[in-house]
Amino acid sequence: MARSTPDVSTTGKKKSQDSTNSVKPPLNVPSAIGLTLTPILAVILVPWYGYSVGFSLYEWSIFAFYMVATGLSITAGYHRLWSHKTYEAHPVVRVFLAVWGACALQNSILHWASDHRRHHRHVDDEDSDPYAASRGFWFSHIGWILRQYKTGIDDFSNVKDLMRDPVVAWQHKHYKLIATATNVLLPLMLGLLVGKLWGVLLLAGLLRLVLNHHFTFSINSLAHIWGSQPYCDQSSARDNGLLACLTYGEGYHNYHHRFQYDYRNGIHWWHFDPAKWLIRLLSLLGLAKGLKRPSPVQIQKARLAMQYQRALQRMEERRDNEAWREGLENAYQKFLSLLDEFNKVQQEWRQLRREQIRTTIEGIDLQRRYADLRSALKTHRRQWRMLTALAKG
Ligand SMILES: [Zn+2]
Ligand SMILES: [Zn+2]
């Protein structure tokens, strides 16, 4: 039914060929009907059935399983495994993610990943980003699926690597069959098993489908409109902890656009990111490996660059004197060199640990330098906060 997707952005200035053309592209009839009817039916039938018959724990449990299985298959599978290759997964995991990803009715992995890679590559470009947020909330949320826009034309040239994955090829070939089996046949069987056919179909089938569609769509729309930009302002992508709760951790979208190869979206332990936890758990069980992430220093530098840029802008707007700006520049450069030094010492220390020669004079000296640098960084971080707060005025 629906063409896929999770995320998008906006800063694109130029108008797309589609939007400058007064004639709207033809409707994508199956998607338009499906995406219109399912929310209407869900809004009417679910409360009506709940009020007149009621849902049991059994029906709610199947609903919860379907929500989690389909949601995580899109985020940990379609998005982080296949679109960005942030880790490698065992074939058993890949089959599970492919089956339940198909159940989410966001098209096959190949379609989804191809669109998504174009989104990252051309973010906010109205002529190339399939769900460019620069074309407005409606377009980026759902409009791009409803019509046959030029930016939505199938082009698998950017997913040739995925075509070599037998699980991806199998899912693409049998997508409709897998989607029908998981969306209709399985709920039908689970419902008939205990005489709760309609309850299971309405909750695990209909309501789950609508919720997961719009949760995913909101990454393309809301996560490019609402939130902060701590890592990068070259695209419209934003970090939003609230959205992360609805999207299985995908709400830290500004970070994701800056470090798309990281298997995490929420980098702190307190960040709600179930897809990250699942991938980590799989790696502990030996079912995933090669989890990619940037070093903490790289992440800090990205944040720092944004803070510096913003502080400088504010100083220029207020026409602060040259001495202030010089002070900020010096503090910024010192912070960078401290981070570089820290990174170097940390790597040397890891090397010594691998070689198990920590107790040598070299090791003890390194330990001392490491401790000194940590303390210097702590002090400088405090000074930096004060400086940037002053720039805010
Ligand atoms: Zn995005
Ligand atoms: Zn992405």
Image: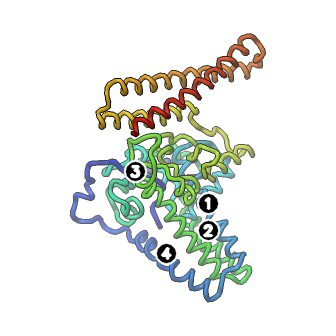
**Three-letter code for the amino acid on which mark 4 is drawn:** Thr
| Residue in view at x 54 percent, y 27 percent | 380
Label annotation for residue 227: none
* As drawn, 152 above or below 290: below
Query: How crowded is the residue under tag 4: few (<14 C-alpha within 10 Å), some, or many (20+)?
Result: some
Residue 39 % position (x, y)? 48, 74
- Left/right placement of residue 359 relative to residue 106 reads right
Q: Which residue is mark 1?
A: 99
Query: Label 2 vs label 1: CA separation?
Result: 8 Å
Tell which tag, 3 or 4, sits nearer the viewer. Answer: 3
- Secondary structure at badge 2 equals helix
| Mark closer to the chain start, 3 or 4 | 3
- Secondary structure at badge 3 equals loop
Tell which tag, 1 or 4, sits nearer the viewer. Answer: 4
Residue 171 % position (x, y)? 57, 57
| Mark closer to the chain start, 1 or 3 | 3
Q: Which residue is mark 2?
A: 182
Q: Which residue is mark 4?
A: 38
* As drawn, 116 above or below 30: above
301 and 155: which one is in front?
Answer: 301
Query: Label 3 vs label 4: CA separation?
Result: 26 Å
Q: Which residue is mark 3?
A: 9
**Three-letter code for the amino acid on which mark 3 is drawn:** Ser
| Mark closer to the chain start, 3 or 2 | 3
Is the CB of the residue bearing disc 3 within 8 angstroms of ligand 1?
yes
